[in-house]
Image: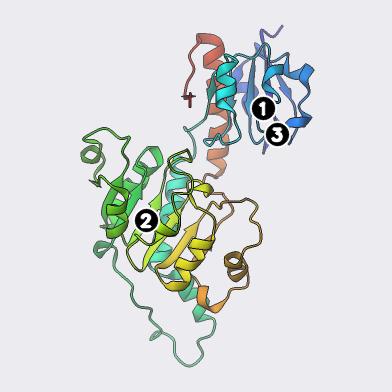
Amino acid sequence: MARWVVGVSDHMMPPLDLEAAALGPEVELDFLDVRREEDLDPARLARLDALLVWSVPVTARSIPHLTRCRLVVRFGVGYDKMDVAALTAAGIPFANNPDYGTEEVADHALALVLSLQRRLWEHDSRARGYTTRWQTNTLSPLRRSSAATVGVVGVGRIGTAMVNRLKPFGYRILGYDPYQPAGHEKAVGYTRVRHLDELLGQADIVTFHCPANRETRGMIDAARLERFKPGAILVNTARGDLLDGLDALEAALRSGRLAAAGLDVLPSEPPQRHPLLDAWRAREEWLAGRLVITPHNAFHSDEAGVEMRRNAAETVRIFLEDGVVRNRITE
């Protein structure tokens, strides 16, 4: 007979064989299979010793029904939909799952950096119309990697992986992260800057790898975009709401303040109608190859999907067996 009952709110890739294997025979899994918090069954919630969550919010609406629950774990890294304060008040620890997809996000960001710096998308777009000339259709400016500076905003797990990927290309690398200890830059291999604006003024390419919180939401606004080096490239594979909407980004691209932008995340997903996105979809000439958007998939690979599921389940198992909360979030 199972000692514990663990619920799974919803999932990208059922069945729950990976979770069952990681949790072991003493756990009964209850696949709730809902997409909206209001569809969670209070009676089923009340049976749970722990809850694994993918996309369903967990707020004051459902937390009072988690009367037996001792831990909530999110499959992913972000926890915008989780009311951590209400969980804490109810005495239920919350943990996220930062131990997967690090390589994938760093690889994705590097691919955007290299392709936009080399203007590959713009070449691809414009080459479709070349008829009488070919090799002479060069684009300028186009800097070699060793002559360019990359600014990494947030030098945690993924930011560090990004720094390590950038180094072989010869980039000068700046890093901004006030939460990393002194000497972190020496161990990893980048030049630390004390102020974000200092990084923005020097970097030819800026790549964001920070979480969304009270300090960072909306940080990429019109005023901050004015502090970017003219002609810089912006890459964001972190969180969409680092962007303060799309108006300022559109203005910066139209004016040439930004040469290009690569985004895996957007302020609203799926994206709503906006003139910038309309121009991107229509392949308008002024934006040709200068805006690359991928559908919030930087984290994904077949291996990362397995790692994500297994690690989240193991966080629950470690807690149930040893009482240790791995990757706890308290804010």
> Quick check: marks 3 and 1 in contact, CB under 8 Å?
no
Which residue has dot 2 on it? 206
Q: Which residue is drawn at 26% across and 32% down?
A: 181
Task: State the residue position of label 1.
Answer: 17
Q: Going from the N terminus, do you reach mark 1 or mark 2 first?
A: 1
* Cβ atoms under marks 1 and 2 closer than 8 Å: no
* Quadrant in which the N terminus appears: top right
The residue shown at (40%, 58%) is 223
* Helix, strand or loop for disc 3: loop
Q: Distance between the residues labelled 3 and 2?
A: 37 Å
Considering only order in the chain, which callout, 2 or 3, is on the residue closer to the N terminus?
A: 3
Q: Is mark 2 on a helix, strand or loop?
A: strand
Q: Residue 238 at what x, y percent from top left?
A: 47, 46
Q: Type of residue at label 3?
A: Pro
- What is the distance, in whole Å, between disc 1 and disc 2 at their CAs? 40 Å
The residue at the point 48 percent across, 44 percent down is 217
How far apart marks 3 and 1 lie (CA) works out to: 8 Å
- The image shows residue 165 at horizontal and vertical percentages of 34, 49
Q: Which of 136 and 257 is in front in this view?
A: 257
Q: Position of residue 258 (x, y in %)?
A: 41, 66
* Residue 284 is at least partly visible in this image: yes
Viewer-nearest of labels 3 and 1?
3
Circle 3 or circle 2, nearest the eye: 2
Residue type indicated by callout 1: Asp
Q: Quadrant of residue 157?
A: top left
Asked whether the viewer can see residue 33, the reply is no
148 up-or-down from 96: above or below? below
Q: What residue type is labelled 2?
A: Val
